[in-house]
Amino acid sequence: MQFFDTHAHLDDALAKGLLPAQMEAARLAGVCGIALPNCDLGTLDAVLAVARAYPTLVWPMCGLHPTYVGPDAEAQLATLKSAAADTTHQWVAIGEIGLDLYWKQDNLPRQQEVLEQQCRWALDLGLPVVLHSRSAFAQTLEVVQGFGGHLRGVFHCFTGSIDEARQAIELGFYLGIGGNVTYKNNPTIETLRHIGLDRVVLETDSPYLAPVPYRGKPNQPAYVALVGHFIAERLGLSLEALAFETTRNAHTLFALPHHSASKP
Ligand SMILES: [Zn+2]
């Protein structure tokens, strides 16, 4: 059985020397792929270092996260753009990029410009986008719609309604489901019950949002299996079927060769 963690920040684990143990735990849990979002110039070296240390397991992304959009955004974007065009790195997406109106509301037009700019890189480079959208689903969707259906990607850490899920899927996007689906009274499982799994990928958002029973503790890619287990149990599916479908979706999303595991 194989799982794909489509969203993990591992720069902190790298800095603390926790990476070898976390990667071993991930392998034991059946994790066959981990995609690493980038936040800003300060995290780029770590993202690339982890990807180099674990080729065939870890896949890097390049992008400027909306909460990191500050006065130096132009300079950061210039450097990130040339990094994204460097094909010696095996980029699988432009990410994470998006809009965040939870932490910052006063620079929305600027966040929108930065998002649009990076969506254009993704189109030029033929890469998907990994979207961070917090308290800003409608605004993020509007930017994506502006690209007329050409853009593809995933709404990471999706916690929206059935209606929002359908809107994202209609645009050809995937939904990234993480540890918060396991939290008490979280409505995402009901959304999944209605929309099914064909546009769903799993993620951890490590080191944040650890699933139950590790809620409140640091998260790690191995825990993607716990997210999968929770969803399979609640939806009455076999874990094998859920792992197969979500892992296949992750490979399609990132245009990686399909894994060899046969359909259960
Ligand atoms: Zn993230």
Image (cartoon, rainbow, N blue to C red):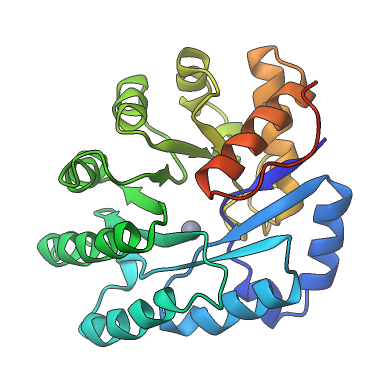
Q: Give above or below for 208 relative to 251.
A: below
Number of numbered markers: 0
Dividing the picture into quadrants, the one containing residue 244 is: top right
Left or right: residue 179 versus residue 155 is: right
Residue drawn at x 69%, y 12% as measured from the top left: 236
Q: Give above or below for 145 relative to 205.
A: above
Residue 116 x %, y %: 20, 60
Residue 15 x %, y %: 68, 82
Residue drawn at x 69%, y 72% as measured from the top left: 13
Q: Is residue 202 visible?
A: no
Closer to us: 259 or 196: 259
Residue 154 x %, y %: 43, 44
Left or right: residue 252 versus residue 131 is: right
Q: Is residue 93 visible?
A: yes
Q: Give above or below for 65 relative to 205.
A: below
Dividing the picture into quadrants, the one containing residue 40 is: bottom left
Q: Give above or below for 244 relative to 117.
A: above
For the C terminus, the quadrant is top right
For the N terminus, the quadrant is top right
Left or right: residue 70 versus residue 224 is: left
Residue drawn at x 80%, y 28% as measured from the top left: 262
Left or right: residue 92 versus residue 245 is: left
Residue drawn at x 34%, y 23% as measured from the top left: 166
